[in-house]
Image: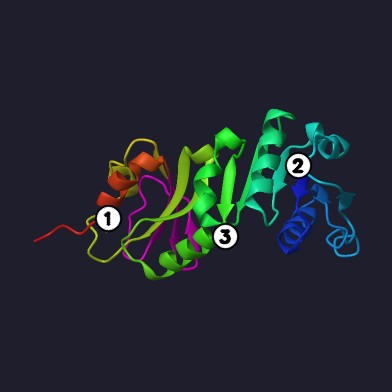
Amino acid sequence: MRVVIAGAGAVGRSIAAELLDNGHEVLLIDRSPHAVSVVRVPRAEWLLADACEIAALDEAALERCQVVIAATGDDKVNLVVSLLAKTEYGVPRVVARVNNPKNEWLFTDAWGVDVAVSTPRLMSALVEEAVSVGDLVRLLRLSQGEATLVEVTLPEDAPLVGTRVGEVEWPRDTALVTIVRGARVIVPGPEDALTAGDELLFVAAPEREPQLAALFTPRKG
């Protein structure tokens, strides 16, 4: 898979190294000569250019890319790169970094973004996931905002404790993907019973989240 990363700072370089380790072809673009340091990621291709300019993206051969990652520290740049990648070059997958959570609402398919990654939001979600029991925690927005990855830790008094997966009437447009039980990762089947302390990961339509959360609310009385 060929991946172009706009932004060769610490974030961009780290992503590049990980992708290269996984056997992918990576090109890093940055307009700063100080950021273009081939010795830091020697297996990557490098391009000293402004990723907001068509000429630079032509040189990067974006039409041959399967993924573009807009990973600069400037949200405006990331939006422009995402829009150009999607509309001018038809890149199948565009992932964009959100630096300021206040700008997250802009990172949608209208700007060519398939997946928006907000580090502050992700970190706060992981903190909530670690300390919250019984509350639905949104971890990530997927597929142009039409689906989310959400997590809930099953409390002891949840009505679903002891219930088999196949017996639960899950909300429409919702899929239970994984049950994490201690050190085990379980691919859920209809006969698997839910137990207190299970971490349940779902892919769900955002509008179904309230219905999903209601399933884990302890019954009063």
Q: Residues within 10 Å of mark 3 (few under 14, many from 20)?
A: some
Instruction: Decide which of tag 1 and tag 2 comes sooner along the chain.
Output: 2
The label nearer to you, 1 versus 2, is 2
Instruction: Decide which of tag 1 and tag 3 comes sooner along the chain.
Output: 3
Q: Is residue 82 left or right of residue 130?
A: right
Say whether residue 146 is visible: yes
For mark 2, what is the residue? Answer: 52
The N terminus is located in which quarter? top right
Label at residue 216: 1
> Magenta segment: does it hold 153?
no
> Magenta segment: does it hold 189?
yes
- Give me the C-alpha separation between circle 3 and circle 2: 22 Å
Q: Check whether the beta carbons of the residues at disc 3 and disc 2 lie within 8 A of each other.
A: no
Q: Position of residue 133 (x, y in %)?
A: 33, 66
Hey, what amino acid is under mark 1? Phe
Tell me the quarter of the picture where residue 168 sits: top left
